[in-house]
Amino acid sequence: MHDIPTWFRAVSLAALAVLLLGDLYLVRRRPHVPTVKECLAWIGFYVGLALVFGGLLYLVGGGTPATEFYAGWLTEYSLSVDNLFVFVLIMASFAVPREQQQRVLMVGIVIALVLRGIFILAGAALIEHFTWIFYFFGAFLVYTAITLVRGGGEDEEYHENRFVGLVRRVLPVTDHYDGGRLTTRVDGRRFLTPLLIVFVAIGTTDLLFAFDSIPAIFGLTQDPFIVFTANVFALMGLRQLYFLLGGLLDRLVYLPIGLAVVLAFIGVKLVLEALHENTLPFVNGGDPVPVPEVPTWLSLVVIVVVLAAATLASLWRSRREDGEVRPTAPRGP
């Protein structure tokens, strides 16, 4: 862990909790479909907050934790954008009313953050006691990268995970919505509306994605505080991004490839760190292996360059394809 003052950690977590609760209150009080202008304003606000937070980290802890935060935030944010593909499928599968989708995303994000927090604490404990787990994390990220390139991570329809299916079987759930209510009455009996199931679906599905993203960010920093705050800032503003991108998600055709490169890079970095701190008796006799270390600043540069290149290449291809299919005006006689 970095030498970041305890008061700064406490104040930061408290401020983020207040911000999330305030955001949740606003969404519940005024459910609506945000305009493009509103989405851009909120996304700019949350991105600005992340940049300011990184600057504050630099002031209280130095350049290393600030660089690690920016690298982790960019990685988590890009992976969260990829998750939006599945969120779109979930909304369509459950036929969520458009005006309730902001609330669904916000509650799902809060659930996801709680589950990710538990996951991060468990991961930090494992790393502290078993440094060899970096071998596993690294290999898993490289495997995930290969899967992304092959297209194995894509699916054209949403399949309920086991937890959502269990909730359906155990609790009485209706097939129709009742505005923004979580419960409704049918023939005098109290039933849950599908809104609760969607909350659970978004939150638990995001946790499944965390099996990729959390090991990735642990490859950039081992400080649980930086890991968690990077996750919070990455998920904040995600609901506005959902409405802003909408159908444009399909145009980011090279994003999975860019994410695959980032995950493979971090996976190799984790393996190198595991070799550098090796304790496994069957690897170099249990002694550390003299391998090069990848500095955090280089990780940040690679992440920025790769994601920018993937985005620009996607936009270029989209514009070229639009130009090819554009009908030409008929010529006169």
Image (cartoon, rainbow, N blue to C red):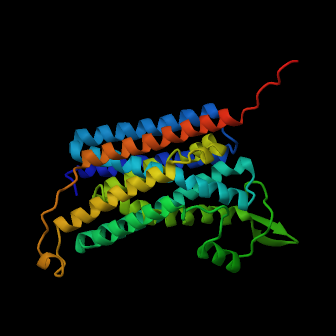
Foreground: 241 or 323? 323
Q: Position of residue 229 (x, y in %)?
A: 38, 51
Foreground: 187 or 86? 86
In the picture provided, is 74 more to the left or to the right than 278?
Answer: right
Whether residue 182 is visible: no
Q: Position of residue 181 (x, y in %)?
A: 73, 58
Q: Quadrant of the C terminus?
A: top right
Does residue 323 lie above or below 208 as drawn? above
* Count of numbered tags: 0
In the picture provided, is 103 more to the left or to the right than 309?
Answer: right
- Name the residue rendered at 75%, 71% in the picture: 173
Quarter of image, res 202: bottom right
- Name the residue rendered at 77%, 54% in the picture: 179
Q: Position of residue 102 (x, y in %)?
A: 64, 48
Q: Residue furthest top?
A: 333
- Name the residue rendered at 60%, 72% in the picture: 161
Q: Residue furthest front?
A: 333
- Name the residue rendered at 23%, 63% in the picture: 272
Q: Quadrant of the N terminus?
A: bottom left
